[in-house]
Amino acid sequence: MSYLRTKEKKEVDFVVIKNQKPWFIVEVKTSDVNICPSLYAFQQQLGCPYAFQVVLNLPYVDKDCFASEGVKVVPAKTFLSQLL
């Protein structure tokens, strides 16, 4: 696990690698639910199936974060519960 940053200072907080390929990327926010443009850019550049904006101040939702590919906003409690 690592982070990504361009020379232009665009970044995401985490990239998770599986089978030597980017599996998902994560941007963490306290309460901002407007998707960070860097998530879209890095997802397309890396070709990873999942990109999450994990928001700390959202309530738990009983939904599978990995049910569909793409960029999405997810509550931190929901996201972290699915990493086990």
Image (cartoon, grey):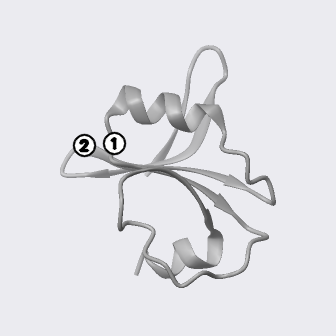
Mark nearest the camera among 1 and 2 is 1
Q: Residues within 10 Å of mark 2 (few under 14, many from 20)?
A: few
Lateral position of residue 38 relative to residue 18, left or right: right
Q: Position of residue 5 (x, y in %)?
A: 57, 28
Q: Residue at x 64, y 15 (%)?
A: 8
**CB of mark 1 within 8 Å of CB of mark 2?**
yes
Q: Amino acid at mark 2?
A: Lys
Extreme residue toward the left, this view: 19
**Between discs 1 and 2, the one toward the N terminus:** 2
* Residue corresponding to mark 1: 48
Q: Taking 26 as reference, is 37 above or below it?
A: above
Name the disc covering residue 21, or none: 2
Q: Position of residue 78 (x, y in %)?
A: 57, 77
Q: Amino acid at mark 1?
A: Cys
Figure quadrant of residue 18: bottom left
Extreme residue toward the top, this view: 7
Lateral position of residue 75 relative to residue 4, left or right: right
Quarter of the image with the C terminus is bottom left
Q: Taking 5 as reference, is 84 above or below it?
A: below
